[in-house]
Amino acid sequence: MYLNHLLEQTLSTVRDTGHFILEENRKFSAEDIEYKGKNDLVSYVDKEAEKRLVKSLSEILPDAGFITEEGTADVGKADRYNWVIDPVDGTTNYVHNLPFYSISVGLMEENEVVLGAIYEPNRDEMFYATKNGPAYLNQQEIKVSSVTTLEESLLATGFPYSKFREMPAYIDVVQDLMQQTHGLRRMGSAALDLAYVACGRFEGFFEYNLKPWDVAAGVLIVQQAGGSVTTFTGTDNYVFGGELVAGCAIRPDLMEVIKKHWYSGKDY
């Protein structure tokens, strides 16, 4: 498979879909909001954007399957290649007209992400990478931060919108890190948080209750930018494991803080 040629077509598709999302945001209203569950918002924009992505990506790689947030694809998961799509990562921001949301598209070959693209249409920023190649932001190669200590770090995280029984441990982690770092930010798009780690705007990112479409593209971009990604316990099941820690050289220290509270024997 020619990843560079595939990447070029993918980026064009993602950018076109981003322009659609941005244009629709100008006329979006509260009446367009739907609920998949408690605090789990969706709109016609998410669904239409996903349909556009599925249609175009099906033409780019006809044998691939799909793992999508909104379930609009007629084709399910395939044995070898699968597109992992979040058409609007940060839907809550989107419906409240907060300009921090993105499209996340990853391509997996069996259990490995081999291509990733994250597009933030408000700033026209495209983050992307392929397996064994550099990571880029708008054609400029990017690297993770050179910071080596938590004390110099700015971190990102995400508040869960479900599974609130884990909140006490999560709050303990946040409280600890607030006293050891430059601060924490909760931006509302895990895909963009990972992209910002990749380009050095954040030194690290952690979150639980994640889905594959939130992170598939982002983890590859972080890795190709020189960072590392694991689950909270240090395994490599970060795409489907529901939790991850990503970062530059500070990631092991960040993990130690998380593990101190998250796996302290408390029964949540």
Image: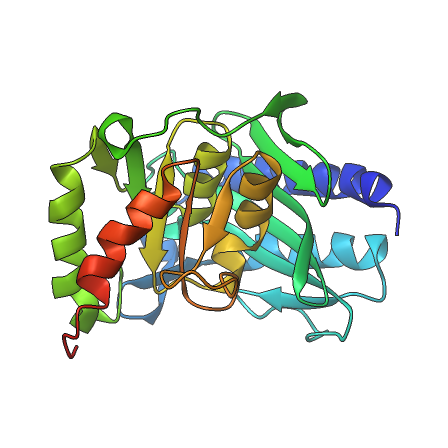
* Quarter of the figure with the C terminus: bottom left
Residue 113 percent across, percent down from the top left: 66, 55
Residue 82 percent across, percent down from the top left: 71, 64
Can you name the residue that lies furthest to the bottom here?
A: 267
Query: Hey, which quadrant is residue 110 in on the image?
Result: bottom right
- Examine the rendering and report whether any part of residue 29 can be seen: no
- Examine the rendering and report whether any part of residue 160 can be seen: yes
Can you name the residue that lies furthest to the top here?
A: 140
Residue 74 percent across, percent down from the top left: 70, 74
Q: Residue at x 74, y 58 (%)?
A: 55
Q: Residue at x 11, y 47 (%)?
A: 175
Of residues 247 and 17, the one drawn nearer to the viewer in this rendering: 247
Side of 35 relative to 48 (left or right): left
Say above or below: 99 vs 10.
above
Query: In this figure, what is the number of numbered marks?
Result: 0
Can you name the residue that lies furthest to the right here?
A: 1
Residue 211 percent across, percent down from the top left: 46, 64
Q: Residue at x 62, y 67 (%)?
A: 67
Side of 200 relative to 98 (left or right): right
Side of 230 relative to 108 (left or right): left
Query: Hey, which quadrant is residue 31 in on the image?
Result: bottom left
Say above or below: 233 vs 155.
below
Side of 255 relative to 80 (left or right): left
Of residues 204 and 63, the one drawn nearer to the viewer in this rendering: 204
Say above or below: 199 vs 86.
above
Q: Residue at x 26, y 25 (%)?
A: 152
